[in-house]
Structures are given as structure tokens and as C-alpha cells.
Amino acid sequence: MTQLPASPLVARRDFCLSALAGALGGGYLCADHLQAQPPAAAPRRPGPQAKKEDAREPRPITLETKDGVALKAVYFPGKTSKETVPIIMLHGWKERGVVWEPLAAYFQRTLGHAVIVPDLRGHGQSVNQTIAGRARDPLTPEDLTPADMEATVWDVQACKKFLEDENNKGELNIEMLCVMGADYGALMGIMFTALDWSWPILTTGKQGQDVKGLAMLTPLDRHKRVTASAAMARLRAPIASGRLSMVIVAGEQDRQGYSDAKRMHRQLEAFYPKDDKTGCVLVTRDTNSHGAQLIEPQRRLGIEQLLANFIAQRIAARKSEFAWTERKSPLQR
């Protein structure tokens, strides 16, 4: 079986880009340049510190969804223990998780966040599904039915379950979960966020309500009879409570993408309190770039830094509101 590609090493890419401007309060983070790793030193016996550093290196993982998909992903461990922000990054239609990996590496190495980047079902290496003990034919985007696409929320849930296990090890804080999606991944992201906020809080503890930030790059509000309308309606309460922040990004020259983004922003913004000017922000650029193209460093659109600021100002800065807790299923309590 073909191995997952190694996490890219990015040589001197300038991430000192424009900030979230007035919409998220000015000031920006300057990370200078993301350096490529130096050449390997002469072989030597690794000591305890080397083993600790190795544990922080990105690694391929395989997760199993509740409906039998073998989900391939890459995990970038965080660096600040129980204050670590976990992020799930979702690629677009007919893409792979690798489109997010340069940004995931930057978020991990420079900002200390924990990031998981899956190949969604039918894409990349996530093509195998076993149902009732029988293997289904390898999945492709063309084979995905509307039911398959709606079930993609279980791919995201499998990623969250992995992050919950890391939370229970004290490696991150699942209460500060952020989801980022591009194109089709944005549609899956808002559908998963609605699912996450639908779980009631039990007397034994929380089951969900962990997504505190949702970033969508050129979001699709519909794709092949799957729409975001029901998910947006279900998010009215968490949005109105001020506990879920959103940013939507689109290129003004991307006519259809820009139109969809404006429509979604208008609907979601209406749910926020009138005095909340940063809860749901629409950010545009004079470009025809679409989806994950918006974060390609060579385009110099400043979206990488914008997303970093979104996490810093709408999630990390509010960590006192999102206290770490151990997360176990009701059967384990």
C-alpha cells in the first residue's frame, strides 16, 4: 500500500502577512520565516530528550469511523499540554489532506497547536469501508452518494475521538476545538459543528459542544443534494450564546464562491447578538483563488496569518472560559 506522504518541509516561506484587520481587533502575529529542517547530524544513540522530540513529529495514523471507513490522516502533536488548541483541517472536493499540511506544520511548529489532517472518505487513501463484515468496493468521489457525503461527518467525529484521547492524556484541550474547511470540507465542517453542538450535556459529563471556532474557505452551501441549511439552523443557539465563533473567507473574483460565502455569512451573522461584531466575520480578497488555494503561501493573500489570529483572539484568548476537563464516555464513569 502506498505510504502517506511525509509532512512537507517548508523553506523560508514568509508568514509575516497581513492581520485580521479591524474585524478581529488589529495587531498581528509575526512568525518571520518558517525554516526547513537542517541536514541530519551523524547517527548517534537517541537520549530521553530526543525521544521526547520524536514524539512531537507529525505522524500518519489510521482511524476507524463508526460506519467502517478506514480513515487515513496525519497528526501534528501540540506543544503546550492542556493549553494546546486542537484543530481539524478538512480538504475540498477531489483533494487530499496534504493541501493543508504546510499550514498545519506552521501552526504546530511556530504556534504550538495540535492539528489533525484527514483524507475524507472517497479521497486520497481513505477509500476502504467495511459494512457488516463485507468490504465495499474502493470509494471514489464519483461513487459517493448524498448519504455517503452526509456520513462524512463521522470521519470528522473519528478525528475528534482521537483528539479526545489526546485530551485525556493532558496533551491538548478539547474544549477549544477549532475546525477549518475548504470548499466541500467547509460544508462538512459546518455539518459536523452542528452535530457536535447537538449532543446534550449529561449528568455524567459532556459529550460534545466542543467546537469553539469554525473557519470556512470558499464554503459550499450545497453539493450534490447535500446542503448546509439544516446545519446552520441548528447552530442558532450556540451562536447566540457567543460560544461559537466563525470566519468565512472568499475571493471576490470567484463569482460563485463569493456569492455562496456572502449568502452564508448573511444567514449566520443574523444569529449573533447585535453587539458582537467579530463573532462571524466575512473576509474577502481581490482574487479568483478558491478553497485551499487561498492559503497557498506563494499567493501572499495573508489568509494564513488571518487564521492564526482567529484562533489566537477568538479561542486561545478565551481559554479561561474553556477549562480543560477529562473526557470519558458515560459507560466509563
Image (cartoon, grey):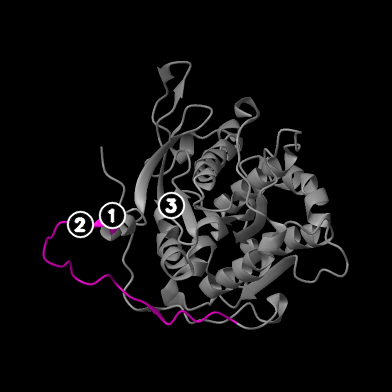
Give residue 46's mark: 2
Which numbered disc, 3 or 2, marks the residue closer to the eye? 2
Position of residue 230 in the picture relative to residue 29 (left or right): right
Residue depicted at x 55% and y 51%: 185
Q: Report how far apart the C-alphas of labels 3 and 2 lie in the structure.
A: 31 Å
Element type at marker 1?
Answer: helix
> In which image quadrant can residue 153 be found?
top right
Asked if one can make out residue 258 in the rendered structure from this viewpoint, the answer is no
- Image spot of residue 283 (x, y percent): 66, 72
Distance of label 1 from label 3 (alpha carbons): 27 Å
Q: If you read the primary sequence from the N terminus, does the residue marked by circle 1 or circle 2 appear first?
A: 2
Confirm whether residue 99 shows in the render.
yes
Residue 46 belongs to magenta span: yes
Earlier sequence position, callout 3 versus callout 2: 2
Q: Label 1: few (<14), some or many (≥20) within 10 Å?
A: few
Give x and y (percent) for residue 194.
Answer: 71, 44
| Residue annotated with mark 1 | 51
In this rendering, position of residue 226 left or right of residue 137: right
Looking at the rendered structure, the kind of residue marked 1 is: Lys
- For the C terminus, the quadrant is top right
Q: Residue furthest front?
A: 48
Residue 13, horizontal then vertical, whole percent = 38, 77
